[in-house]
C-alpha cells in the first residue's frame, strides 16, 4: 500500500532541492573585471568631503547594493560592468586582511580581475609635487630589516640593514607591460590643481617640487611608519637602490602588503598601484621636520581635494579601457600596439 506521508515528504524534498538549485543559479558570483581598493574615506561615500574612495564611488557605484564580506573592514560595491571596489583600511595589516577576505569570498570571482590599489601618498620634493599621480613600477616594504639610532653607528652611514628571510616579501616588480599600458592610456590626463597647492610648492627650492601636477612612475615605498624628514627620505631611496628598484618617488602604507596577498592567491601580473601626492616627505629648508609634521593652522599643503579627484580621473581611464576592451584583456595583459 502506498504511504501517502512518505510520498508527500519525498515531493517536498524534491521541491526543496529544486529551490536550492534556483537559488544557487541566482547567487552566481560577480565576475570582477577591475577591483579598486582605497584605504580610507573621510565620511560618507558620497555627498561630503571626499577621501580616497568617494570620487570612485560616485563614478561607478552610486546605485550599487553593498556586498558584505566577513573579515573585510567595509562592504564591496560592484556595478553591472564588473567594476568593484571597497575601502580596505589604512596600514599594512588592516588593508591586507580586508583584501584576503575579499579574495576568498564566494560572492566574488576575482580570478581574472585587474587590481588598482588607489590612494594618497607623500613624495620627496626632489622627485615629485603636490597633486601629481604616480603608477608604481616597484613596491618596496620599508619595514623589513634592522634599524638603529644614527648616534649608534658611524657618522653619515646608513642606519638600515636588510634582514635575511624576507627576500620574497619585501620587493615586488609590477608587470612592466601593465605599467606601460597605464602610462599610454593615462599619461596625458588633464589634472586638477589649486591656488593653495601652487603657493605651497613655492616654499621648496627643488624644480620637481615646483612642477605642475603630472602623471609619472617610480618606486612606491610601503611602511607602517609615517617616516618624515630628509634623513628618512634618503634612507628610503637607499633601500630602493639596495634592492635594485627604481627611484623612490612615493611613500605609502599598504601597497606591498596588499600585493603580497593577491600574489599568493592569484599572482601579481594584474596588480597596479596608483597614488596621488598630497604632501612632501620632508619640510622646506626653513622649517624643521617636527614643524612640518605639526604645521600651524593654514600652513598645510593644499590640493587634497584636487589630488583625490586626479587619482580617480587617471584610474578611471585605465579601468574604462580594460572593461570596454574586455575581449582583449580577459586572458591577460595584451601586447602594446606598435609605435
Image (cartoon, helix red, strand yellow):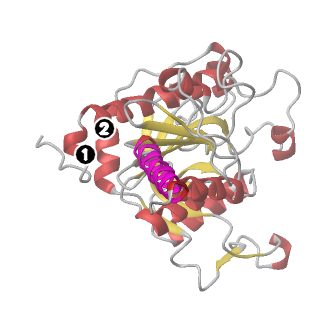
148, 32: nearer the viewer: 32
| Secondary structure under the numbered disc 2 in the rendered image | helix
Magenta stretch secondary structure, dominant: helix
Does 326 sit above or below residue 266? above
For the C terminus, which image quadrant?
A: top left
For the N terminus, which image quadrant?
A: bottom left
Q: Is residue 61 left or right of residue 329?
A: right
- Whether residues under marks 2 and 1 lie with C-beta atoms below 8 angstroms apart, the answer is yes
| Residue lying at the far left of the rendered structure | 338
The residue that appears at 55% across and 21% down in the rendered structure is 62
Highlighted range, magenta: 6-25
**Circle 2 is placed at which residue position?**
322
> Percent from the top left, x then y, of residue 139?
51, 59
Decide which of tag 2 and tag 1 comes sooner along the chain.
2
Mark 1 crowd level (few <14, some 14–19, many ≥20, 10 Å Cα): some
The residue that appears at 71% across and 28% down in the rendered structure is 301
Please identify the quarter of the rendering in which residue 193 is found: top right
**Circle 1 is placed at which residue position?**
329
| Residue lying at the far front of the rendered structure | 1
The residue that appears at 67% across and 40% down in the rendered structure is 280
| Secondary structure under the numbered disc 1 in the rendered image | helix
Mark 2 crowd level (few <14, some 14–19, many ≥20, 10 Å Cα): some
Is 20 contained in the magenta span? Answer: yes
Amino acid at each position: 500500500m502506498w504511504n501517502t506521508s512518505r510520498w508527500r515528504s519525498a515531493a517536498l524534498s524534491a521541491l526543496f532541492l529544486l529551490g536550492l538549485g534556483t537559488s544557487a543559479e541566482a547567487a552566481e558570483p560577480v565576475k570582477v573585471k577591475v577591483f579598486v581598493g582605497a584605504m580610507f574615506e573621510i565620511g560618507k561615500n558620497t555627498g561630503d568631503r571626499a577621501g580616497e574612495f568617494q570620487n570612485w564611488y560616485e563614478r561607478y557605484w552610486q546605485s550599487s547594493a553593498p556586498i558584505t564580506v566577513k573579515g573585510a573592514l567595509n562592504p564591496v560595491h560592484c556595478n553591472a560592468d564588473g567594476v568593484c571596489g571597497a575601502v580596505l583600511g589604512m596600514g599594512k595589516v588592516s588593508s591586507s586582511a580586508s583584501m584576503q577576505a575579499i579574495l576568498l569570498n564566494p560572492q566574488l570571482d576575482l580570478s581574472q580581475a585587474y587590481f588598482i590599489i588607489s590612494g594618497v601618498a607623500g613624495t620627496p620634493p626632489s622627485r615629485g609635487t603636490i597633486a601629481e599621480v604616480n603608477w608604481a613600477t616597484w613596491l618596496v616594504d620599508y619595514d623589513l630589516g634592522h634599524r638603529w639610532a644614527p648616534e649608534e653607528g658611524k657618522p653619515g652611514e646608513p642606519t638600515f640593514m636588510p634582514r635575511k628571510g624576507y627576500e620574497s616579501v619585501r620587493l615586488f616588480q609590477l608587470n612592466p607591460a601593465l605599467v606601460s599600458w597605464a602610462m599610454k592610456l593615462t599619461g596625458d590626463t588633464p589634472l586638477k590643481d589649486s591656488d593653495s597647492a601652487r603657493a605651497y610648492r613655492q616654499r621648496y627650492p627643488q624644480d620637481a617640487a615646483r612642477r605642475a601636477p603630472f602623471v609619472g612612475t617610480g618606486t612606491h615605498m610601503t611602511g607602517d611608519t609615517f617616516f618624515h624628514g630628509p634623513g628618512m627620505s634618503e634612507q628610503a631611496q637607499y633601500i630602493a637602490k639596495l634592492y635594485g628598484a627604481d627611484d623612490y618617488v612615493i611613500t605609502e602604507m599598504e601597497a606591498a602588503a596588499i600585493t603580497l596577498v593577491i600574489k599568493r592567491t592569484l599572482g601579481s601580473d594584474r596588480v597596479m598601484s596608483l597614488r596621488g601626492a598630497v604632501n612632501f616627505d620632508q619640510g622646506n629648508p626653513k622649517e624643521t621636520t617636527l614643524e612640518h609634521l605639526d604645521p600651524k593652522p593654514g600652513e598645510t599643503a593644499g590640493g587634497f581635494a584636487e589630488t583625490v579627484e586626479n587619482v580617480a580621473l587617471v584610474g578611471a581611464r585605465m579601468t574604462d579601457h580594460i572593461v570596454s576592451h574586455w575581449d582583449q584583456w580577459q586572458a591577460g595583459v595584451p601586447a602594446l600596439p606598435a609605435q
